[in-house]
Image (tube, rainbow, N blue to C red):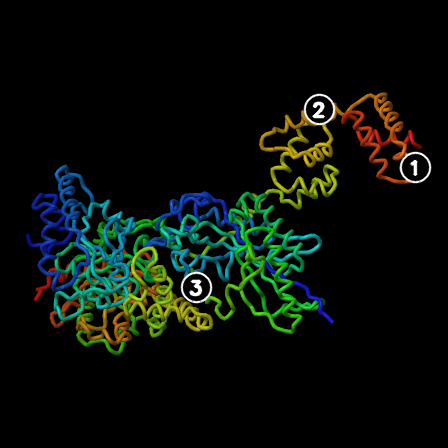
Amino acid sequence: MDVTKLTIKGAIQSLKKKEYSSKELVQGCLDQIKRHDATLHVFLTVDEKTALQNAQEADELLKQDITKPLLGIPIALKDLYTTNNLRTTAGSKIINNYMPTFDATVVTKLKEAGAIIIGKTNEDAWGHGSSGENTDYEATRNPYDVTRVPGGSSSGSAVAVATGMSLAGTGTDTGSSIRLPAAYCNLVGMKPTYGRVSRYGIISMASSFDTIGHMTKTVYDNALLYEITAGCDPKDATSVDVPVPPYTKLLEKDIKGLRIGIPKEYFDLQGMQKEIQEVTQTAMKDLESLGVQFKEISLPHTSYAMACYYILVPSEISSNLSRYDGIRFGHMRNQFGAEAKRRIMLGTYALSVGYYEAFYKKAAQVRTCIKKDFENAFKEVDVMIMPSSPTIPFKIGEKASDPLAMYLSDIFLCPVNIAGIPGLSVPCGFTQQLPVGMQIVGPQFSEERLYSLAGEYEKIHEWYTHIPNIK
Amino acid sequence: MKKIYEPVIGLEVHVELKTNSKMFCGCPADHFGKEPNTQTCPVCLGLPGALPVPNKKAIEWCIKLGLALHCTVPAESKFDRKNYFYPDLPKGYQISQYDKPLCENGWIQINDRKIRIRRVHQEEDTGKLQHIEAEGQQVTLVDFNRSGVPLVEIVTEPDFHTIDEVDQYVKQIRRIIRYLDISNADMEKGSMRLEPSISLRVSGSDELPNYRVELKNINSFRFVRKAIEFEIKRQSEILDLGETIVQQTRGWNESKQVTLPQREKEEAHDYRYFPEPDIPPMRFTNVFVEGIRKQIPELPDAKKSRFMKTYNMNESVADILIQEKELGEYFEKTVRLSQIPPVIIANALVNQSMDIQNVKPEEFINVINKKQQEKQVDTGVVETAIEAVIASNAKAIEDYKKGKVSALMFLIGMVKRELKGKGDATTIEIELKKRLA
């Protein structure tokens, strides 16, 4: 069967109507993996046997008309998600033989909702990267142009969804890692409010920035998964006890009169490609036709964001990666990849006696300023819109030797993590036959607003129907 | 001329709390004598993705201890990461507290001096290394049962000048902890650990020396004394030679009876402390803190004063009765249940090592009553006994008349023997004196 055009919403209906079985659906995805994985390098582990077995069990339940929100739906998990008895590598060679003994909270929730784990996806090792090239394995390719990057760090999960290897792909977003691959692969990618989704069992990159989200083809699919994964977790002290609204039911909410902010610092940015400007402006016109209002706003500390990010995040990384000492599991530390080593050194330096005040502490103060910027702006507007990336997906190897240029591809995305607010990347068109994404940002816990705006916009073009033609 | 030195000593005390569960996970905190690695989970093993969730009870107990030590409890506190590598530390960092401890600026009274307490903070214990021989090879094994057990650290200012003060302080701290019922504070089992730091200054100076020597790995009161004594001697010998003392960490070596260097200042760790991002900062309301203060029972010093005042007890007896909370409580229960004068009960408790776990106060009252009755004998019998003793101890009587006090004691003893242990010593003394006057 052809799985490439499927959405979760459509598949759930078809499964209920018995148009096909979950086993056929899972087999369709597995076939797609077999067809393209050698070219695209999407999966690090495929759990074929268990997936088919679980599909069969799902089919039994479907026969009895038992309903679960994701019953029989194949999904792919980024390899930072700890999975009981299923190899978890973090995209790194250091723990290429690590077999966890427990499931991440989100994995438990997805399994309970009836989802079928098809496998673990490739990524920049430990989540360090924006292109997928920092994997310790083979770099994942963009299905719209295999000479280009798919965006990272959740590279494999994005490509899995874009190519029908799974119907949803989970990710983590510390600076851009869900929204950038979503933008580069024509997907909807949610970076939640910090603390909205449990981090328990997700291998930490930078604990105070890490958020746990996912990529899907449509806004509805995205909201559906979010209803399942969001919520307070007693095992994660930083998760927040705020009730989870029924996101899918709130999609049809009227967006007329919604005030949308355009941060002038972002659109003035040097290095933004003209085509990106144009596609974004067209999307804004479309939005205007839906009755929203635009307003220019200012985020004055924007120019300090990347510096702030690249001090605080490596600081936390240097500490979070110290448990990989090769004593109880995994390999010796000299096997860390170049980017992990770079960040361990940066962070160790920033936290050292004599440097802490000048680096870590200063950056923590800047973080507060950036948070305030957003808080002030959200007094005037309901959401903000900006491109997800200043450029189209770049060529494999183009920025690999220039870490600074690579860091700057996240310029519109990192500030959102610094502020701990939600950001949703939605497809907004194509240029040179490559997808372009638009980011919608809102205040803390405003995800339903982001979804309803994105949902209304999606109806205009249905960009998700433009599936890649893998060459 | 040889200079006279004065020791300047500060103390860090680590105490394992006896909460049901560990500091950041649900594993049992009681690890003593358990099969290695049977009380672990992803959190205390530091497995990828596992996250710490603070134990509320442990934090309450830490605050309780801080309040008992007259500390203030700031409205805001937080955990920090102390980064260092050691095989018993599975995460590569210890969750501890750096610049915002739960409690600060307390004190404790030792004799007529106040020892200032700089801070009382909450952290987690590490695993334990075992160096053993297995299959003909020297190997090191790690037991993570202790990893993540709640640990409270009490840090004093360098306010001690004698070993006795240190000794009294440690015992007083242990008593308070046991009264609060938050730890067994048992040094032999490692649930209480001491780290003194010692330096010397010329007597009469009140400046702090510009170095200090930290002592680690001391697991008994006896060793603390010996280690400090050794250090004072070692340091004064170096100073006498006009040399300077290296700032370093030393350990007590019991078999050699010396302290040996472990780490020099140059090799000192840079722990790269930073706020623990997995745990939100804590805020405490006044109501919360005062609620904890209300739970603090009467502490040893207060109990001692009250016993002396209420029961007209002398200090040495009161001192013994307050050593263990249970003993004091047993005493007061016995007083409530009987008509016997409290002083007699107190003396009986102190002089006979009563098994208070197994003998109920009611039974104890019977024992005292019986003893009292047994002691009662006819005045006639006492007089006869006195006559017999006088008849056969001419030498002692002569000595007594010359003013030898011990002779009287001897004669009382002889009369008691004649009475086969019966009779009251005070009565016998009065009668004897009358007879010999």
Q: Quadrant of residue A270?
A: bottom left
Read off the residue under disc 1.
B401
Image quarter of the N terminus of chain B: bottom right
What residue is at 50 percent from the left and 71 percent from the top? Answer: B266
In this view, the mark in front (3 or 2): 2
Chain ID, mark 3: B
**Which one is closest to the eye, mark 3 or mark 1?**
1
**Which disc number belongs to residue B370?**
2
Secondary structure of the residue carrying tag 1 is: helix
For residue B60, above or below residue A382: above
* Cα–Cα gap, marks 3 and 1: 80 Å
In the foreground, A447 or B215: B215
Q: Decide if residue A293 is on the left or right side of residue B157.
A: left
Kind of residue sitting beneath label 1 = Lys
Find residue A59 and report its horizontal and vertical position in percent.
13, 42
Q: Above or below — where is A31 with respect to A114? A: below
Quadrant of res B321: top right
Residue named by callout 3 = B274
Which mark is on residue B206?
A: none
